[in-house]
Image (cartoon, helix red, strand yellow):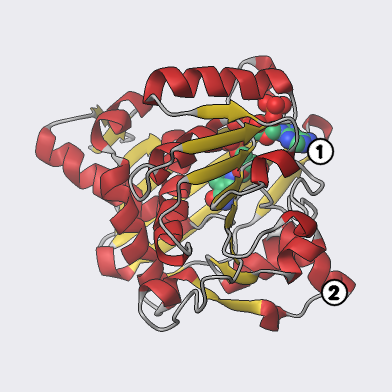
Amino acid sequence: MALLLRESHLRELLTMRRLIPLMERTLAAFSTGAAVQPLRPVVPVDPHRGFLAVMPAYLVTQEALGLKAVSVYPDNPSRGLPSHLATILLMDAQTGVLLAVMDGRLITEMRTAAVSAAVTAKLAARPPRAVALLGAGVQARSHLEALREVAVPHDVRVWSRTRDGAERFAAETRERLGLHVTVAASPADAVRGADVVCTVTSSRTPVLEGAWLEPGLHINAVGAARPDWQELDVAAVSRSRVFVDARASAVAEAGDLVVPLQAGALTAAHIQAEVGEVFAGLHPGRTAADEITLFESVGLAVEDVATAKLAYEDALARGIGGELSLT
Ligand code: NDP
């Protein structure tokens, strides 16, 4: 009998406070060879402007084996659906037996932001107070929730493609989290004077320009998870010290890097390290207060299976979830 964990179960089980250190350990394990994770195959569904990706991994340190199937349909919000939908299968690493089938949408939402928060705590020049969000969707919300665990965001600025989207986000955040949130008229306005910028859009073309970056800034670039999608222009990447979640994935999947690499504007040597190397103490990370640091995130299967294993073990201990039999 496998365990069935719906999104409502996972909401009871997962907190940012626990996910942030888990992501730190997971990425350290990944970057020190304690994980098996191939590049994810991606099936484009061009007639419907979507794609399906399959993300398997084995994380040795946590004996976490499984896979996530994630479909990404950026136009879904206009249909009243999330742009990202996902399902995770968790297996017993010793026998391969199916342990659990669970929602992967909330795990994607939370683990991505938990990783950015862990990285921000490590790479930001100072405890961030002014936070700029470019994008006002699911990841914008979860990034703010996660950043609150590692910082005191007194001054949150949000910009989105539609003014309405940014206004809705600001009103909801003020009410839910009691934070001071203002809507910026342009990405440049949002970024001016910020300690941390999170780019969390589905944009295919740059929304953050190098000319706007101020010394000491830290950037979490989350949205450009396909090789032809860019959120940062080439100047923004060139001016930054670049950290990635996985080198192999970043140079194949992150448009912010793939486009300048293919154009010859950068070489792979511009990538300083994987953030897991920083978490493992193998790389110093930021070395001066005036550096601009950039974390380019594509999202890894190890983050999903680590979170799924944590949720599974807690669900068993707390008697949460349903039963599912395939026999
Ligand atoms: P949502 O659909 O919830 O939000 C998307 C946001 O992007 C909205 O603010 C929307 O603006 C904006 N947007 C959409 N199209 C454009 C455009 N052409 N130009 C500028 N802005 C645009 O998505 P999520 O928050 O879930 O995801 C955001 C990004 O992060 C996506 O690219 C997604 O693939 C990526 N992602 C990365 C992960 C990782 O691990 N690195 C994991 C999960 C997601 P408006 O509403 O105003 O139209």
Mark 2 or mark 1, which is nearer the start of the sequence? 1
Badge 2 local density, few (<14 within 10 Å), some, or many (20+)?
Answer: few
Quadrant location of the C terminus in the rendered image: top left
Quadrant of res 165: top right
Q: Position of residue 267 (x, y in %)?
A: 76, 80
Circle 1/circle 2 CB separation < 8 Å = no
Question: What's under tag 2, amino acid-wise?
Answer: Ala
Identity of the residue furthest to the front in this view: 193
9 with respect to 46 (left or right):
left
Tag nearer the camera, 1 or 2: 2
Q: Position of residue 148 (x, y in %)?
A: 37, 42
Q: How many marks?
A: 2
- Residue 74 visible in the picture: no
Image: 87 above or below 277: above
Q: Residue at x 57, y 67 (%)?
A: 244
Q: Which residue is mark 2?
A: 265
Q: Which residue is mark 1?
A: 46
Question: What's under tag 1, amino acid-wise?
Answer: Asp
